[in-house]
Image (cartoon, rainbow, N blue to C red):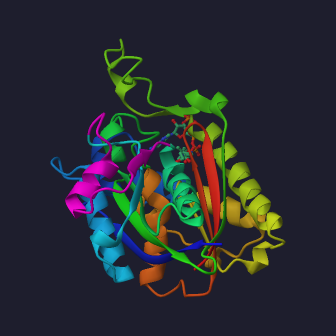
Amino acid sequence: MNYARIVGTGGYLPEKVLTNADLEQLIDTTADWIVERTGVEERHIAAPDETTCDLAEKASRLALQAAGLEPADIDLIILGTTTPDHVFPSVATQLQHRLGCYGGPAFDVQAVCTGFVYALDIANRFIRTDAAKRALVVGADTFTRIINWKDRGTCILFGDGAGAVVLEAADEPGIIDCQLGADGRYKKLLWVPAGVSSGYEQTREEAAFVEMRGSEVFKVAVTTLKDIAERILSAHQMTVADVDWLIPHQANRRILAATAKRLGLPEERMVDCVRTHGNTSAASVPLALDVAVRDGRIQRGQTLLLEGFGGGFTWGAALVKY
Ligand code: UT7
């Protein structure tokens, strides 16, 4: 049986940094409130002419370089995003074109902040069934493009970025398991009301931007992130003690801390990039993974638990032997 192994990671954050002091000039808030309630101190914002595909390309090239592979080695591209450059074609096909590795399947996955974990699960299944040998799996979002900069409950949280991994077929795991879920009843706790089929010309101008009932999202996020971690671990007769690194969706520092506490996992074993990244949606998990790989915290042979949670709601966990 084939398994899929992570052989390279890459991440990219746009140059422009928006600090909490900058936000104090834009909305009725204070830097102290933002840090205390979210843990975010700064976030990166894509330049006006910089698109999701631009960010994805930079992260992907770094992941390929880390893997010691060429674009031509890639036979599958799956990209999680909620902020594609165009309605169509997908970002994945345009990324394929930029990289110049034509012919294999390339498609986007829409699961909001869980997009990368969904993409990872699908790519893992392609490799396990011998339908692909080397996959590029990307999470990329220019989420600040759908932020209402007058809404102080959301604009403080989000940033832009991209993260990527290269998966390769191997004799041993690799990806031990991925478990995904969704519950569409939560639609209106976190959504963008306008859209292609329901119409962009809504009566309210703000309908084109993210609307969130923050404290309600917060509660479901904490419960879900704990539950899915325990479920995937118990399915493999493992406990939190077997996990070297928890890499949760970087939504809010308080969500991360509460999840670690409920799981009984020391915070030192959790990768936390909230302070400098903010919530980068589908990019959040692969970006955090890449940071901890590159700074040497994550070592080969260690056990990682990746967790996503986002609009829909959607959620997913991936248990990985790095
Ligand atoms: O990717 C997954 C999606 N998102 C999340 O996971 C986000 C989950 N939620 C959160 O991170 C938090 O709910 C927030 C950071 C958004 C808000 O924190 P909170 O502790 O849940 O605050 P709240 O919404 O209950 O609001 C408390 C107060 C309100 O004032 P009143 O009504 O008590 O007078 C807000 O108007 O804080 C006020 N407030 C602010 N004050 C200063 C809300 N945003 C701000 C702000 N600055 N930026």
The residue closer to the viewer here, 190 or 255, is 190
Residue 78 included in the magenta stretch of the image? no
- Can residue 97 be seen from the camera position used here? yes
Q: Position of residue 231 (x, y in %)?
A: 78, 59
Specify the segment rendered in magenta. Answer: 86-110
Quarter holding residue 305 = bottom right
The residue closer to the viewer here, 73 or 261, is 73
Q: Quadrant of ligand 1?
A: top right
> In this picture, is 64 found above or below 199?
below
Q: Residue furthest top?
A: 203
**In the visual, does 247 lie left or right of 241?**
left
The residue closer to the viewer here, 276 or 190, is 190
> Residue placed at 55% from the left, 56% from the top?
117
> Residue placed at 34% from the left, 40% from the top?
27
Q: Residue furthest left?
A: 49
**In the visual, does 47 lie left or right of 24?**
left
User: Can you say which quadrant of the picture contains the N terminus?
Assistant: bottom right
> In this picture, is 169 found above or below 144?
below
> Residue placed at 29% from the left, 76% from the top?
70
Quarter holding residue 302 = bottom right
> In this picture, is 16 found above or below 224?
below
- Can residue 279 be seen from the camera position used here? no
> Residue placed at 77% from the left, 67% from the top?
233
